[in-house]
Image: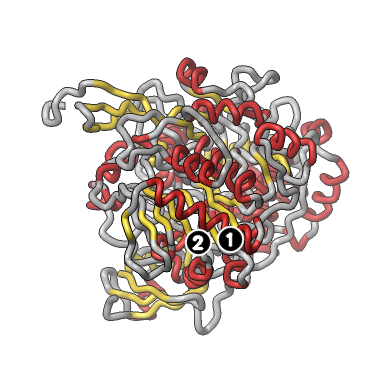
Amino acid sequence: VKEIGKPERAVVTTCAYCGVGCTFRAEMRGEQLVRMVPWKDGKANRGHSCVKGRFAWGYANHADRVTRPMIRETIGEPWREVGWDEAIAFAAGRLRAIRQRHGARALGGITSSRCTNEEAFLVQKLVRGGFGSNNVDTCARVCHSPTGYGLSKAFGTSAGTQDFDSVEEADVILVIGANPTDGHPVFASRMKKRLRQGARLIVVDPRRTDLVRSPHVAADYHLALQPGTNVAVLTAMAHVIVTEGLADEAFIRERCDGDEYREWVRFVSDPRHSPETLEAVTQVPAADVRAAARLYATGGNGAIYYGLGVTEHAQGSSTVLAIANLAMVTGNIGRRGVGVNPLRGQNNVQGSCDMGSFPHELSGYRHISDATTRALFEAEWGVALDPEPGLRIPNMLDAAVEGSFRAIYIQGEDILQSDPDTRHVSAGLAAMECVIVHDLFLNETANYAHVFLPGSTFLEKTGTFTNAERRIQMVRRVMDPLNGYEDWQVTQLLANAMGLGWDYPDSSAIMDEIARLTPSFAGVSHARLDAEGSLQWPVNDKAPEGSPIMHVDGFVRGKGKFVVTEYIPTDERTGPRFPLLLTTGRILSQYNVGAQTRRTANVVWHDEDVLEIHPSDADNRGVKTGDWVRLASRAGETTLRALVTDRVAPGVVYTTFHHPLTQANVVTTDNSDWATNCPEYKVTAVQVAPSNGP
Ligand code: SF4
């Protein structure tokens, strides 16, 4: 404080990085933000923070920020800076012309999980009510869409079952496909505190993450599986629980569908699903799987936490269902200390999904084909809605290449860098007649844009984010938007240029509309959030104070649903040409493709992405730590430096995807989850060879 001077005022707001949702006091001197201080009353963080939320906010004033709208007739031409009126008229004119020539289904949009609930809600409203199609999707497509599918099917709602406080009563913690130390650091600290108090730990991960062995915690069991075999490991654990008589039969009798349970029991009991039989597939010693299954089933309160190592697979949805099966068969659901908890990546990925950002669902996860729900929205919005589900992001790109999809409005998402199979994404974007990018920086996707609408940061807007524990919290404007508008206002300008006549005076009026149309948000308002700090949905007549724990007396869908999940090997197999399996992850100081963190002081902690490779695989190739290597798959290739380490097993390599020069997604393939099209980022067959550098 001595160095920066005493702050003159402070505003409490919510971090815009990960799904933990830490709250901060943004301390200001004049119009300058001088520091972010973790707020001791923050319900998700209780005064703690990580290096991203605390230090990585300087991008808000970075010289790369675009503050004036830009347009151009064709891609490749230089941009022309224009005023807001001209840019919005240009965009709306193109959208209207395309709709007239090719129909409403030629248009679509992508909402952002970095933006507020109110902003995501308005983008999907513009697409459905203004463009006239259901071609709306969200970046959750590439991360947690299998969570939406799996948890909705098993339990009846697409969200984690617990609040973060619940971990304090967990006796056995099962972490699968997640590295919370780097990805969700503040929650990881709470988890580690519980582990130091004596809770037991099972980690299922191909890589030896910090949780497996660090100075203060160590896993009881590390099931270091082959990438792509999550379903096989979980089925083997279920086999042990069922065949050794460890199932919670009373819970199942009372809470779950009996016929589906019996069918599932027949499936998992089959000897072909024993840990011993599946060891050849998973590479995990059968004895470890048996011991871990017994511990989870009999060790007291069992809580499962999972991340993108579960969802970003060809069997992502099956894995989520297998996790739900495991929780139900042991009765680990519906009370504190247990549950199924997806660790959400982006600050508002839960919220963007809640707000109707999927092509088949209106807000609150209600199917677009349901006439009663549609009628509710039609009455409020004064438009007729298309009853057919729209296109997902990869299908929009396919349709663009084929010629039937012509225009897209993308808010806060760099699909060219963050989506798989970069060549296919660029081909789809290049084929469109109108690409509108609404973002902070001229990102890679903007290379294919005709209109660039400057966006606003979380420091320049008021609205709400919803974190991984369904906690809705206020984001408060601490400085004026550099471009003159908050993002929801830009969407409103575009909607009105399309003839919709919206007149939201502020984002609180948008939340009031969300509450009118979404039963799980019925009791939410900005005024209430200001008064109470936060609320966990559902908040309605049945749960006026919100719902820290879900499925307490019964599942939202009624009876819990067991689903048979057959292990199906991924198409990404190793062979003579591509003998190694690549998996990807994050580091603590950086965030996703680095658009924000790399424009802050945090960049000093991350010069480049490196390739972790086991000593035996490195020796075979004559590679040492620091050497350049060429990483190639059937999709593409990149060059990066090697880090020789036994954190990864022989046959497995690992990298992060934060640095623009690496572009790890050049290598990832177009394989995707069978149910949701979530890309299979976590398994790519690759070759690694020495290189002279990029
Ligand atoms: Fe908290 Fe996540 Fe922000 Fe770190 S990045 S301060 S853990 S919300």
x and y, in percent, of residue 501 in the image? 56, 37
Seen at 20% across and 27% down, the residue is 30
Q: Is residue 196 visible?
A: no
Q: Which mark is residue 434?
A: 2
The correct choice, above or below, for 571 with respect to 674 in the image is below
Residue at the right extreme of this rendering: 259
User: Which numbered disc flags the more N-terminal residue, 2 or 1?
Assistant: 1
Helix, strand or loop for disc 2: strand
Which amino acid type is shown beneath numbered disc 2? Cys
Label 2 within 8 A of ligand 1 by Cβ: no
Residue at the left extreme of this rendering: 3
Which amino acid type is shown beneath numbered disc 1? Ile
Asked where in the image residue 521 lies, by quadrant, the reply is top right
Q: In this rendering, would 157 be left or right of 194?
A: right
Look at mark 1 in the image and give the residue it sits on.
98
Ligand 1 image-quadrant field: top left
Q: In this rendering, would 189 be left or right of 60?
A: right
What colour scheme does the image use?
secondary structure
Q: CA distance from mark 2 to mark 1?
A: 8 Å
Helix, strand or loop for disc 1: helix
Q: In this rendering, would 33 be left or right of 391?
A: left
For this rendering, which residue is in front, 244 or 545? 545
x and y, in percent, of residue 451 in the image? 42, 57
x and y, in percent, of residue 601 in the image? 23, 47
Asked where in the image residue 268 lies, by quadrant, the reply is bottom right
